Image: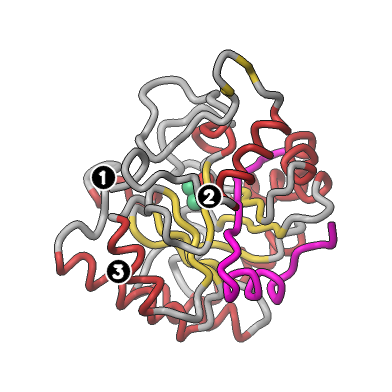
């Protein structure tokens, strides 16, 4: 497989070829998900939850993100690599965001992701103008979990949906190439995609109609204890059979590419 790049990802989105994305935090698993045909790997600040055992992403810092980005970069040969800007590393100013983004790019990220709408638009433009590809993240933004009152579906009412659409359009105009939409009604995700044609939309709990899908690797493998959110599917199970990590990732890729995952009823809002 040739190395994925932004031009090829845009072509995939333009011809409606589903994009399969997973999170990853270390080199061995990166090699396996890359071999399974995953298009995009995100070093998510969800590493706070699944690697560090914390109850939120707030304690994750830039040093943690740079370390795990370096580890993942060494394991990849084809997938596009995105690094999450952690809480506190980008909100103060565009300059702060640029310095943090440079740290992640030097660690091997090809794109950085940041959470939030309105106030982050200027920051996104600042990064893009300086040659840093940006993925925006709207809907449920876990770094704001306390402000949002918990992990709940966003954009359920008309005003919320309107804000999401406006934020997505502003992000597209600012030059963001990609947008993660987390925990929003499928209908709102469709509206966002239609209203911001320049963006490659990637959904998690956002229904089947985004350009691509993302899951946390540990959720996709059924490794996460406790109640499973409805948008998650355990791809390690094949009836009575247990799949290897690489086979589970390949099954995820196949289901996303065939638009069989997510199921609009079972996994959507
Ligand atoms: O950190 C993360 O894993 C994420 C994805 C859920 C999009 O931001
Ligand atoms: Na994240």
Q: Vertically, is 265 above or below 196? A: above
Q: Residues within 10 Å of mark 1 (few under 14, many from 20)?
A: some
Q: Specify whether residue 10 is painted magenta.
A: yes
Against 54, is 141 above or below?
below
Q: Which residue is mark 3?
A: 164
Residue in front for this viewpoint, 203 or 151: 203
Badge 2: few (under 14), some or many (20 or more) residues near its Cα, within 10 Å? many
The magenta segment: 1-26
Q: Is residue 223 depicted above or below 111 in this figure?
A: above
Horizontal side, residue 106 vs residue 58: left or right = right
Look at the numbered disc 2 and say if its residue's Cβ is closer than 8 Å to ligand 1: yes
* Circle on res. 152: 1
Q: Quadrant of the N terminus?
A: bottom right
Q: Which residue is mark 2?
A: 214
On residue 114, which mark appears? Answer: none
Badge 3 local density, few (<14 within 10 Å), some, or many (20+)?
many
Residue 252 image offset from top left, x and y in percent: 60, 40
Q: For the residues marked 3 and 1, what is the alpha-carbon distance in whole angstroms?
A: 15 Å
- Distance of label 2 from label 3 (alpha carbons): 19 Å
């Amino acid at each position: 497989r040739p190395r994925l790049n932004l031009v090829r990802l845009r072509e995939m989105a333009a011809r409606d070829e589903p994009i399969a994305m997973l999170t990853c935090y270390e080199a061995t698993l990166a090699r396996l998900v890359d071999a399974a045909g995953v298009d995009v790997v995100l070093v998510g600040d969800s590493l706070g939850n699944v690697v560090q055992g914390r109850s939120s992403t707030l304690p994750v810092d830039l040093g943690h993100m740079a370390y795990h980005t370096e580890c993942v970069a060494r394991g990849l040969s084809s997938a596009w690599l995105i690094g999450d800007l952690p809480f506190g590393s980008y909100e103060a100013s565009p300059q702060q965001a640029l310095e943090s983004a440079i740290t992640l790019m030097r660690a091997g990220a090809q794109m950085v992701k940041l959470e939030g709408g309105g106030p982050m638009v200027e920051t996104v433009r600042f990064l893009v103008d300086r040659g840093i590809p940006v993925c925006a993240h709207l809907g449920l933004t876990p770094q704001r979990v306390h402000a949002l009152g918990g992990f709940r579906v966003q954009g359920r009412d008309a005003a919320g949906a309107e804000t999401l659409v406006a934020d997505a359009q502003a992000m597209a105009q600012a030059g963001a190439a990609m947008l993660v939409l987390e925990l929003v009604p499928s209908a709102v995700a469709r509206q966002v995609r239609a209203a911001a044609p320049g963006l490659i939309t990637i959904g998690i709990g956002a229904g089947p109609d985004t350009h691509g899908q993302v899951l946390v690797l540990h959720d996709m493998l059924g490794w996460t204890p406790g109640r499973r959110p409805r948008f998650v599917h355990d791809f390690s199970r094949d009836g009575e059979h247990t799949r290897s990590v690489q086979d589970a990732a390949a099954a995820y890729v196949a289901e996303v590419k065939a638009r069989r995952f997510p199921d609009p009823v079972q996994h959507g809002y």
